[in-house]
Image (cartoon, rainbow, N blue to C red):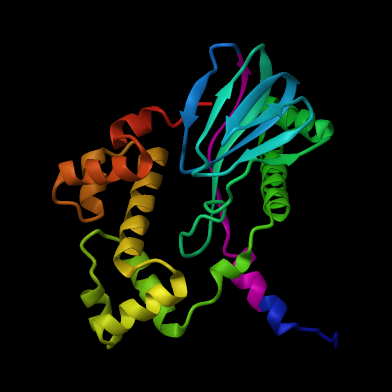
């Protein structure tokens, strides 16, 4: 009988920080950029990953300029406010994605620098070849490469996974309740009653462990779920709002705009911007 060697700490880390990660690819395409590819300020709730094959373009943020050069892979993290321009033509494959934990936290949300994977022309050529081929086997291989690039970006960014530390049973139960009953009307009192604890006790412990007030966490979770539905489906925005407990569509649109910088109807139309 083979002897199995278990490392409990390894398994805990794997299940908590790696196995629960879900890469949701929102948009994938090739494009030839021209000088009209220009914007002073862009900010989106997903990572933009660029595989540059030829030409030249640039992005800039906080006084820095990053040259987009052939053979490199660039990951622009979610929530980074940056500008872009293309002095000449530039050919690239771009991928918009989110990397979400089981509790819907965005792994890249706290990264504030562009991540550069240099000297990867073989990889760049391969992803473009697989994308152009487009058969089922090529699609599977392409997704594997995209995932590898994303995880390599995580390692290079130096993300501190301790920020996603395992929670106490009380806080974990609260998060699970929010996930299963994701609507804007969920309150601390409702969750506390279900978990048989005083609301103030729950709110204090939640803020201590998660770093975000419980009410704010609920709101962010709900908006993240509405954003996923708006981006990935053609369901009416009115229905999506109602699905997550918004009885007032004006309030839903105003809250969505505050979080994602534009109303949901415009956000849906602009989901394929390169």
The residue that appears at 41% across and 28% down in the rendered structure is 270
Task: Quadrant for residue 95, please give it.
Answer: top right
Seen from the viewer's position, the closer of residues 97 and 180 is: 97
Seen from the viewer's position, the closer of residues 111 and 246 is: 111
The residue that appears at 78% across and 28% down in the rendered structure is 125
Q: Quadrant of the N terminus?
A: bottom right
* Horizontal and vertical percent position of residue 135: 67, 32
Left or right of 249? Residue 166 is right
Left or right of 58? Residue 22 is left
The residue that appears at 37% across and 27% down in the rendered structure is 269
The residue that appears at 47% across and 29% down in the rendered structure is 41
* Horizontal and vertical percent position of residue 7: 75, 82
Magenta-colored stretch includes residue 29: yes
Q: Height in image: 44 above or below 99?
A: above
Seen from the viewer's position, the closer of residues 262 and 240 is: 262
Count the labels in the image.
Answer: 0
Residue 182: in sight, yes or no?
yes
Task: Quadrant for residue 20, please give it.
Answer: bottom right
Magenta-colored stretch includes residue 203: no
* Horizontal and vertical percent position of residue 143: 66, 43
* Horizontal and vertical percent position of residue 175: 39, 71
Q: Height in image: 167 above or below 227?
A: below
Task: Quadrant for residue 210, please give it.
Answer: bottom left
Q: Bounds of the magenta span?
A: 12-33
Q: Quadrant of the C terminus?
A: top right
């Amino acid at each position: 009988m083979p002897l199995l060697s278990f490392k409990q700490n390894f398994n805990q880390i794997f299940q908590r920080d790696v196995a629960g990660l879900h890469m949701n690819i929102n948009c994938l395409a090739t494009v030839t950029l021209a000088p009209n590819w220009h914007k002073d300020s862009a900010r989106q709730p997903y990572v933009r990953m660029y595989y540059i094959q030829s030409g030249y373009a640039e992005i800039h943020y906080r006084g820095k300029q990053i040259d987009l050069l052939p053979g490199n892979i660039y990951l622009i993290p979610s929530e980074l406010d940056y500008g872009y321009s293309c002095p000449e033509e530039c050919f690239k494959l771009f991928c918009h994605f989110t990397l979400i934990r089981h509790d819907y936290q965005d792994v890249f949300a706290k990264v504030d620098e562009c991540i550069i994977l240099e000297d990867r022309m073989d990889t760049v050529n391969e992803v473009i070849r697989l994308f152009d081929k487009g058969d089922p086997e090529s699609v599977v291989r392409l997704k594997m490469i995209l995932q590898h690039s994303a995880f390599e970006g995580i390692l290079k960014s130096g993300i501190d996974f301790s920020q996603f530390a395992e929670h106490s049973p009380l806080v974990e139960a609260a998060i699970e309740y929010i996930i299963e009953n994701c609507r804007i009307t969920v309150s601390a009192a409702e969750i506390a009653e279900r978990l048989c604890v005083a609301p103030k006790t729950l709110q204090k412990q939640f803020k201590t462990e998660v770093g975000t007030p419980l009410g704010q966490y609920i709101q962010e979770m709900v908006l993240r779920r509405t954003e996923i539905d708006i981006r990935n489906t053609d369901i009416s925005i009115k229905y999506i709002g109602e699905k997550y407990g918004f009885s007032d569509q004006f309030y839903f649109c105003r809250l969505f705009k505050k979080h994602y910088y534009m109303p949901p109807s415009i956000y849906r139309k602009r989901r394929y911007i390169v």
